[in-house]
C-alpha cells in the first residue's frame, strides 16, 4: 500500500497514526510526503519525500499526477484547506489513485462560511446567521467577524460594539459577521466510507486552542451531537475524514454549527488514539474491506494534551 500526503507541514502525529495502523494490521505501507519546502517537519517521518510546486502554480496538479502514476500511489490524502477544492475538482483525473476527498460541490460549501451557515440551516441544524456588511449587522453584541474563506483563526475577532466592528471590517478581507455564541465549543471527528456512510462519529470538547488548532481536548460521547451529525451526513455524504465544529450555547443548551473541515483535522490523531481509529479504517477500506458503523469507539472522558517537538532538518 502506498499513500501520498500533500502539504504535510507539521502533521507528524497523523503520519505516525498511519504507520501504527499499518503495523497493527501487519500491512506493508509506504508513506510519501509532499510539501513545498524541505524543512517541513513531517517530511522526516515519511518513507519518501517529494518537493512540489505551490498550490497556485499551474504545475501543482500535473506534478501530483506524475508522482501518483510513477510511484503507483494507491491513495492521496490532502491535509490543508487551500488545496481541497483544487483536488476535489481533479479527483477523477488521478488514474488508479484514490483521492480521499468529498465532491467539489460540498467542498465549495465548506470553503465559504456564508454557504456553510446556509447549508447547516438547510439540513435542519442551527447556525449563527451570517451578515456580509458591517453597517447592516443588527443582531447584537458581542459579535464575531472573520473571513468567509478563512482558516486557523487568522483575521478572526470578537467585537464588543459597532465601533469595533467597523474598525475590524476595514482590516478583515471579504468578511462575514455572526452573533457571538457564549458556550462550549466542540469538534466532531467523523470518518465515513467511500459512499459517505459513517464509521466513526466522535464529539470532543475543545479545552484549549492555539491558532485554531486544539491543544487539549476531551472525548465526550454526546448523543445529541451524534444524532445531529448523522442528520448532516444524510445529505453531505463525505469521503473519508471530516471535522465539524459547533458551540453549545450556555443559556439554552442548543447547538449552533459553525464549520465543516472536509479533511483530517489537526486534532484527529487524538481521536484516533482514543479508539476511533480512522487511519486503520481507511487502510482497511483501501484494501477492499467493508466496514460498519461503530458506536462509542473512542473512550468517553479521555483527555489528551498536545505538545511541541523538534526535528533536525539540516
Image (cartoon, rainbow, N blue to C red):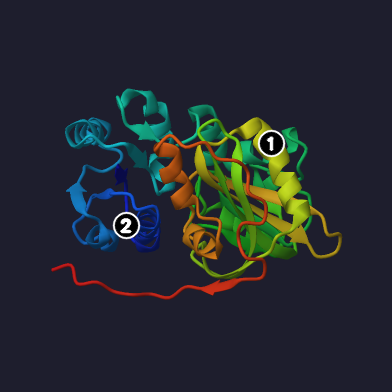
Q: Is residue 252 left or right of residue 285?
A: right
Quadrant in the picture for residue 195: top right
Name the spot of residue 239 as percent of width and height, x first.
Answer: 51, 36
Name the spot of residue 132 as percent of width and height, x first.
Answer: 64, 42
Residue 271 visible in rendering: yes
User: Residue at the location (76% across, 54% down)?
Assistant: 223
User: Residue at the location (21% across, 30% down)?
Assistant: 69
> In which quadrant of the rendered image does the N terminus lie?
top left
Q: Which mark is residue 86?
A: none
Please tell me which residue lies in front, 45 or 165: 45
Please tell me which residue lies in front, 233 or 88: 233
Q: What residue would you read off at disc 1?
A: 118
Name the spot of residue 94 as percent of width and height, x first.
Answer: 31, 27
Residue 129 visible in rendering: no
Count of marks, rendered view: 2
Please tell me which residue lies in front, 295 or 11: 295
> In which quadrant of the rendered image does the C terminus lie?
bottom left
How packed is label 2: few (under 14 Cα within 10 Å), some, or many (20 or more)? many
Q: What residue would you read off at disc 2?
A: 9
Residue reaching furthest front?
26
Precedes in sequence: disc 1 or disc 2 = 2
Question: Up-down: is 232 above or below 213?
Answer: above
User: Residue at the location (57% across, 57% down)?
Assistant: 168
How packed is label 1: few (under 14 Cα within 10 Å), some, or many (20 or more)? some
Q: Is residue 312 left or right of residue 196?
A: left
Residue reaching furthest left?
314
- Distance (Cα) linking label 1 and label 2: 32 Å
Name the spot of residue 117 as percent of width and height, x first.
Answer: 67, 41
Element assignment for label 1: helix
Amino acid at each position: 500500500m502506498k499513500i501520498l500526503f500533500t502539504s504535510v507541514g507539521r502533521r507528524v502525529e497523523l503520519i505516525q497514526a498511519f504507520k501504527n495502523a499499518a503495523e497493527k494490521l501487519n500491512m506493508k505501507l509506504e508513506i510519501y510526503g509532499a510539501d513545498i519546502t524541505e524543512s517541513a517537519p513531517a517530511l522526516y517521518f515519511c518513507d519518501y519525500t517529494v518537493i512540489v510546486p505551490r498550490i497556485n502554480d499551474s504545475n501543482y496538479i500535473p506534478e501530483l499526477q506524475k508522482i501518483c502514476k510513477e510511484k503507483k500511489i494507491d491513495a492521496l490524502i490532502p491535509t490543508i484547506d487551500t488545496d481541497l477544492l483544487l483536488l476535489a475538482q481533479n479527483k477523477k483525473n488521478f488514474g488508479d489513485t484514490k483521492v480521499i476527498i468529498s465532491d467539489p460541490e460540498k467542498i465549495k460549501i465548506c470553503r465559504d462560511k456564508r454557504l456553510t451557515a446556509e447549508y447547516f440551516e438547510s439540513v435542519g441544524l442551527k447556525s449563527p446567521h451570517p451578515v456580509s456588511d458591517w453597517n447592516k449587522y443588527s443582531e447584537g453584541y458581542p459579535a464575531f467577524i472573520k473571513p468567509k474563506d478563512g482558516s486557523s483563526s487568522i483575521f478572526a475577532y470578537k467585537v464588543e460594539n459597532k465601533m469595533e466592528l467597523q474598525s475590524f471590517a476595514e482590516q478583515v478581507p471579504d468578511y462575514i459577521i455572526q452573533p457571538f455564541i457564549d458556550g462550549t465549543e466542540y469538534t466532531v471527528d467523523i470518518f465515513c466510507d467511500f459512499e459517505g456512510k459513517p464509521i466513526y462519529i466522535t464529539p470532543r470538547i475543545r479545552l484549549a486552542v492555539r491558532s485554531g488548532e486544539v491543544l487539549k481536548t476531551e472525548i465526550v460521547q454526546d448523543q445529541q451531537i451524534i444524532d445531529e451529525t448523522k442528520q448532516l451526513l444524510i445529505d453531505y455524504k463525505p469521503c473519508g475524514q471530516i471535522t465539524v465544529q459547533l458551540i453549545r450555547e450556555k443559556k439554552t443548551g442548543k447547538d449552533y454549527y459553525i464549520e465543516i473541515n472536509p479533511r483530517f483535522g489537526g486534532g484527529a490523531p487524538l481521536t484516533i488514539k482514543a479508539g476511533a481509529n480512522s487511519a486503520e479504517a481507511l487502510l482497511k477500506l483501501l484494501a477492499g474491506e467493508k466496514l460498519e458503523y461503530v458506536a462509542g469507539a473512542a473512550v468517553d472522558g479521555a483527555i489528551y494534551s498536545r505538545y511541541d517537538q523538534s526535528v533536525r532538518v539540516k
